[in-house]
Amino acid sequence: MNAVDILVKYFKRFAVIDYGEGSVAVGLVPYTPYTAFDFCVDAYYVASNTFYQKGRSMITELNGAGIRATRAPAETPLKTLALQAGLVFQGLNSLTYSGEFGSRFYIYAVSLPRTPAFSTYKESRAECLRCGACVKACPVQMTDDKSQMTDKGTGHKARGAGEGQIINNSNCEQYMSSENCVRAAMDSPANMSNAMSAAAGTRLWGCDVCQRVCPHNNEVVIEPPDPLARAARELIFTGDMSVLAGYIGANHARKKRLLNLAANAAGNTGDRAYLPPLQKLGQNPDYALNAQRAIEKIERGKPF
Ligand code: SF4
Ligand code: SF4
């Protein structure tokens, strides 16, 4: 069995391209988003955690066939490689899109010894329509307005970029900073700004507002698994990460991060039922900013 025979069993869409001294297989793992709910967790994180075990099995199988494969290192520029392989195109919101899956996929990459190039991609290439819907919908206007879009290459310009500066996939992450994007701000919520606190709304983990409005996304949504939704809603009362960790992985389900996010989401519900756990959290310096801000929002009856 060669590498492609094995990869095809795990990825719906993938490509093998030269990278460094060897090759890399870049695969798209599609998922279906969840309906929005209070304390919602983005299905992306559940999908990436679910594929973690499958990815390990794939690498074990590759190794068993005598192929020296490893998961690509964390610093591997996944979006850039997927673009280079022609699997995806760049959207204005800096996310990558596939003609088949929209932006609803997770990218997983495997380092391989030098392997002949291969791609499962057979369709005509779709592209960003530049309709500006993601720009209008973004709660913090992370993306630039249509008039400032550029036609140079596949780059685009986002708020914070200098005049004429093109964001490519190797440096766009710096613009997706905690000051510009809710998703990025959620990575370290202990010091979240008031603007990001409001823009996060009642979401617990993840922001996909710009993806929900993109015409490239098929807006079929599914209900989240009940244990996940319940654990997310009850987190602020229980402080129990175990169920969430089973869905999104222990790395994402870090107590300090998620309890801060739960406090913030609770404040944005405006529901007085959350005052007792918020008061308790507010006594702990690790959660004080978010808990006290949430209490103020609820007390004044104006969550946003
Ligand atoms: S993830 Fe949210 S905050 Fe970030 S660009 Fe999209 S809509 Fe804006
Ligand atoms: S919403 Fe429109 S502008 Fe934004 S990524 Fe999708 S097609 Fe491109």
Image (cartoon, rainbow, N blue to C red):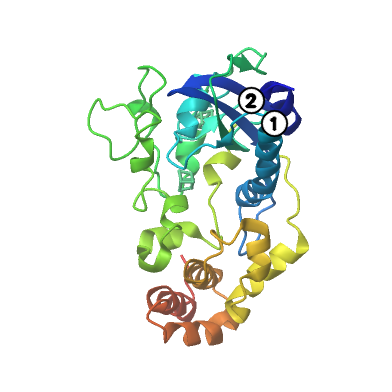
- Helix, strand or loop at label 1? It is loop
Image quarter of residue 159 = top left
Percent position of residue 57, x then y: 71, 42
286 relative to 125, above or below: below
Label 2 CB less than 8 angstroms from ligand 2: no
Percent position of residue 134, x then y: 50, 37
61 relative to 250, above or below: above
**Mark 1 residue type:** Phe
Percent position of residue 114, x then y: 53, 20
**Mark 2 residue type:** Phe
| Label number found at residue 158 | none
Few, some or many residues within 10 Å of mark 1 (<14, 14–19, 20+): many
Q: Is any part of residue 115 visible from this angle? A: yes
Instruction: Name the residue: 65% across, 50% down.
Output: 43
Label 1 CB less than 8 angstroms from ligand 2: no
**Along the line of sight, which residue is nearer the eye, 66 or 86?**
66
Q: Are marks 1 and 2 in contact (CB under 8 Å)?
A: yes
Residue topped by disc 2: 14
Percent position of residue 258, x then y: 52, 67
- Helix, strand or loop at label 2? It is strand
3D distance between C-alphas at marks 1 and 2: 6 Å
Instruction: Name the residue: 63% across, 38% down.
Output: 104
**What count of labels does the image hold?**
2
| Side of 7 where 176 appears, left or right | left
Residue topped by disc 1: 11
| Side of 85 where 55 appears, left or right | right
Few, some or many residues within 10 Å of mark 2 (<14, 14–19, 20+): many
Residue with the most extreme left position = 163
Q: Is any part of residue 12 visible from this angle? A: no
Q: Classify the position of the N terminus by image quarter.
A: top right
Instruction: Name the residue: 37% across, 32% down.
Output: 170
